[in-house]
Image (tube, coloured by chain):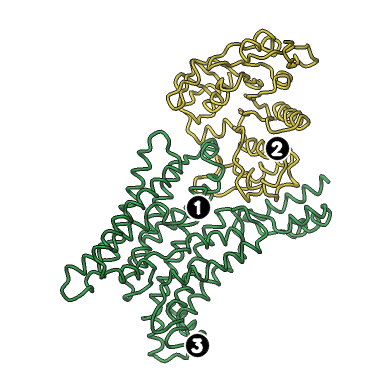
Amino acid sequence: MVRDQQARITPRSARSSAAPRSARSNAAPRSAQSNATPRSARSNAAPRSARLKARWLAVGVAAVAIAAVAGLAFGPVALNPFGVAAELLNLIPGVDIHSGLTEREAAIVISLRLPRVVLGLLVGAMLALAGGCFQGVFRNPLADPYLLGVAAGAGLGATAAVALGASSSIEGGGSGSGLVPAFAFAGALVAVALTFGLGASGGRVRTPATLILAGVAVSAFLTAIQTYILQRNVETIREVYSWLLGRLSTNGWREVVLLLPYVAVTAVVVLAHRRELDVLSVGDDEAASLGLHPQRSRYLLVAAASLGTAAAVAVSGLIGFVGIIVPHTIRLMAGSSYRVILPLSMLFGAAFLSLADLLARTILTPSEIPIGVVTAFLGAPFFVLVLRTAKRVGL
Amino acid sequence: MNAVDIADLHVALDSTPILLGIDLTVGTGEWVTVIGPNGAGKSTLLRAVGGLLTFGGSISLLGTGAERIRRRDRARLVAIVPQTPVVPPGMAVLDYVLLGRTPYIRPLGRESRSDLAAVDDVLRRLDLVRFADRALETLSGGERQRAFLARALAQGAPLLLLDEPTSALDIGHQQEVLDLVDELRTDRGLTVLATMHDLSLAGEYADRMVLLAAGRVVATGPPRDVLTEKLLSEHYGARVRVIDGENGPLVVPVRSSA
């Protein structure tokens, strides 16, 4: 029995080290499992390693590639996916593959569709990462990226921009729409700043719950103002709602360029703390006794995730569901460590949103369905399916 | 050099004074158990030593003032097993114990080979190897307590703070856990500062006991000096008989004759 135990533990440490797997460490778990009692053998069948497995990473990258090619190939003009893939590879300097697409088709792929697909990937990655981050920081499975008032702030900003545009512009609402991203971004940041201010002024009881409650209060306050503005400017309702339900639309690479730096900063900050989020899952006291500064980490992570979310919301509107469903799906399928959840959420969130956008713009061509409707319509049943089939729950 | 030197320790929680001037020393390698009625401030004392509270007065750990020790360094000196540790959902025992290596892992780094070796060692020592891949929440109370202990041991800290380590366990597992702590103390030269409610059990394992009541130390010394009928009735308001046992006094509650 003692030898068994030794064999059981060796491969884990061997696997995680940089050294290549030896034949011994490959063989050990099998022999150990066959000797173990049936019950423990079953529970060992899917060991939950906190480390991200290469297999999952590969699946995630493949999902992003498939979603990107599908998003580029399908639309009002359907193109050959292989040609599209070749055309994509041709973007890499030094690569020149014959794609079989005409010049016009290649232009559709590269100039028209690619910016939108990239935007979808970035927004999806951002929202899913932020959602996973919030769930970890607040140790709350219901946390989503809009928890601290980002949605209400952005909503108010957008509404104000549309209303302002409608009343100031004589030619029509066109000029107001141009202001929407800037106003939404500003609104979201102001909302998060208010939430932080309120949460911090909670005095001696500065728990995660204080911050969440401050978020609720700020959201309610800003939503009230938004509703009032909306009610005073009824003619703008349609435009505001189309924004509220989410919409990926691009004007060349402008939105992508706007969003990219925020996504990069947020991703670096959040991913760098992925192990710390695992430590935070034992609570603030124990995390502090392990040498961390939980409060400091929490504020940093929440600030980073909120900044990224605000940027995403500014270019895409309020796309619900991605931030909450994608991280949970990963958790159920690949494990509950944030070292697994966060990187995979980025990949699968990107793929999911890109596919959702494809459906949003193709199902009812030439009109578009709001992407938020698609994400919920697809995401909810899929999530129920995952919940029912996943062996490990542990939300 | 003492493991812990506490002088005139004051702690207030929500501006309610909890500890009112505690003086206490714990020698290196000693097992000191703090007893006292509910609300006496036992857990608060432990948390203050663990650096989880702001306090007045002074606490020194291995000769260095606690306020001068950085949090990360302190985590290498002091390991705490709280009364009811948080059980993170879905976390495997191996990963849970690995959290104990946090003070040795660079802020943005990952576990090194030596971290994994330290955890392997602890898991083997506490007979947890077969649970390594199991989710912590699926373990029984006794197994869980061993896992909590394993995480604290993985910290490699010479000072172990145990807050009610046996409160959730049946009598057999209580003894098992305390025997284990005592063996580890000898093997690894640990110093143990614990709080306990079961007085007989506390007396059997402690080198020295500290009776805390209403935020002050009212008695300290070897178990025989602290576990007396007079002190216990005075500070616990309890009716007890104290019988001389093999390894220390045995405290037996008795019903009032009235």
Q: Which mark is residue A135?
A: 1
Q: Are marks 2 and 1 in contact (CB under 8 Å)?
A: no
Instruction: Give above or below for B55 relative to A243.
Output: above
Q: Which residue is mark 3?
A: A80
Percent position of residue A240, x then y: 31, 67
Q: Nearer the viewer, residue A146 or A85?
A: A146
Q: Nearer the viewer, residue B173 or A50?
A: B173
Of the two numbered discs 2 and 1 in the rendering, the one whose residue sits closer to the viewer: 1
CA gap, disc 3 and disc 2:
60 Å
Say if labels 2 and 1 share a chain. Answer: no
Q: Which element carries disc 1, helix, strand or loop?
A: helix
Q: Give me the chain that's yellow.
A: B
Crowding at label 3, few (<14), some or many (≥20) Cα neighbours within 10 Å?
Answer: some
Q: Amino acid at mark 2?
A: Arg
Q: Give me the chain that's green.
A: A
Q: Quadrant of the C terminus of chain B?
A: top right
Percent position of residue A368, x then y: 40, 78
Q: Which mark is residue A35?
A: none
Q: Are marks 1 and 3 in contact (CB under 8 Å)?
A: no
Q: Quadrant of the N terminus of chain B?
A: top right
Q: Nearer the viewer, residue B208 or B21?
A: B21
Instruction: Give above or below for B76 relative to A173.
Output: above
Q: Amino acid at mark 1?
A: Gln
Q: Which residue is mark 2?
A: B146
Lateral position of residue A99 relative to residue B171, left or right:
left
| Quarter of the rendering containing residue A112 | bottom left
Q: Give me the chain letter of mark 2.
A: B
CA gap, disc 1 and disc 3:
40 Å
Which badge, 1 or 3, is on the more N-terminal residue?
Answer: 3
CA gap, disc 2 and disc 1:
28 Å
